[in-house]
Amino acid sequence: MTKLLYITVNPKRDGKLSKGMQIGEVFLNAFKLEKPDVEMVQMHLYDMEIPEMDIDLMYARAKISFMGRTFDELSEVEQIKIMKMHALADQFIDADYYVFVTPLWNLGSPAILKSFLDNLFIVGKTFINTEDGPKGLLTGRKAIHIQTRGGIYSTGPMADFEFGDRFLTTALGFLGLEVMDSIIAEGTDHFPKQLPEIMAKAKQEAVEKAKAMAKETVTISN
Ligand SMILES: Cc1cc2nc3c(=O)[nH]c(=O)nc-3n(C[C@H](O)[C@H](O)[C@H](O)COP(=O)(O)O)c2cc1C
């Protein structure tokens, strides 16, 4: 069955309190209308146990990926932590479509998203190193990023200061996913009077982009 992974990166549990998740809901509803048989699975990162790249995981990863050690040669704690990392990566890999919802926080994304992504970069599983450089293995899959921003970064003096959307979409592209688009609702805090207009525009865009993404066929070869 076709699967869409809905990854929400916000400590707000109630989606109605998050402007990003409100736009995300509109996206999911429009996607489902176009592709009713899709299975939607949510990963709310703040409700998950995300392995931290600590000293055990760092060494376990290096031993297996670069030092030719086998799983059995790892310490017990390293084995447990690397298994959790691979389990999370397996959960991520097992989808066709990906919708990320994040707010811009201090010029980037909430730190938990970086912790999550650190679990996905696994040599031999999600990317390989070739003579021509790294090559992502998660090809065929389609992703979209919905981001909310208090200020304006698409133009003006802050244009070079946005590293949330830029990092996430670059990282996903590195792993081989096709990032179709980003839906940005910006100025949510700095222009409160225009908020209804900002949200209406983003929701309209979400409907259009959901329809477009649902029409895209996903062919996964690995
Ligand atoms: C900790 C924190 C840091 C933030 N940093 C920025 C920032 O650097 N730039 C910006 O434009 N907005 C920033 N904001 C504002 C949020 O991006 C904005 O309120 C957004 O609409 C929140 O989306 P949400 O309603 O989905 O949580 C920050 C908000 C928080 C809580």
Image (cartoon, grey):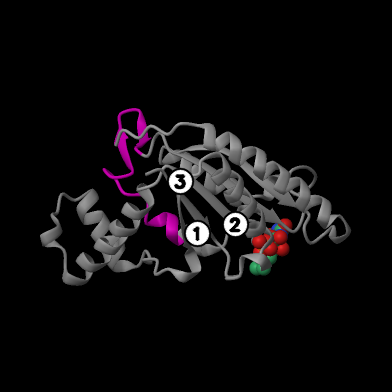
Where is mark 2, residue-wise? 102
Q: Is residue 199 visible?
A: yes
Q: Earlier in the sequence, mark 3 or mark 2?
A: 3
Where is mark 3, residue-wise? 38
CB within 8 Å, label 1 to label 2: yes
Q: Is mark 2 within 8 Å of ligand 1?
A: no
Ligand number 1: quarter of image: bottom right
Q: Which mark is residue 177?
A: none
> Considering the numbered disc 2 on the image, is that residue within a helix, a strand or a loop?
strand
Q: Is residue 146 left or right of residue 88?
A: right
Q: Is mark 3 within 8 Å of ligand 1?
A: no
**Marks 3/2: CA distance?**
23 Å
Q: Nearer the viewer, mark 1 or mark 3?
A: 3
Where is mark 1, residue-wise? 113
Residue 102 percent across, percent down from the top left: 59, 57
Q: Is residue 106 visible?
A: no
Residue type at the position of mark 2? Thr
Residue type at the position of mark 3? Val
> Considering the numbered disc 3 on the image, is that residue within a helix, a strand or a loop?
loop
Q: Residue at x 72, y 51 (%)?
A: 185
Extent of the magenta region: 115-137
Q: Is residue 74 left or right of residue 188?
A: left
> Considering the numbered disc 1 on the image, is that residue within a helix, a strand or a loop?
helix
Q: Quick one: label 1, few (<14), some, or many (20+) residues within 10 Å?
A: many
Q: Nearer the viewer, mark 1 or mark 2?
A: 2
Residue 14 percent across, percent down from the top left: 61, 70
Image quadrant where one finds the N terminus: top left
Residue with the most extreme top position: 132
Asked which quadrant contains residue 175, the reply is: top left
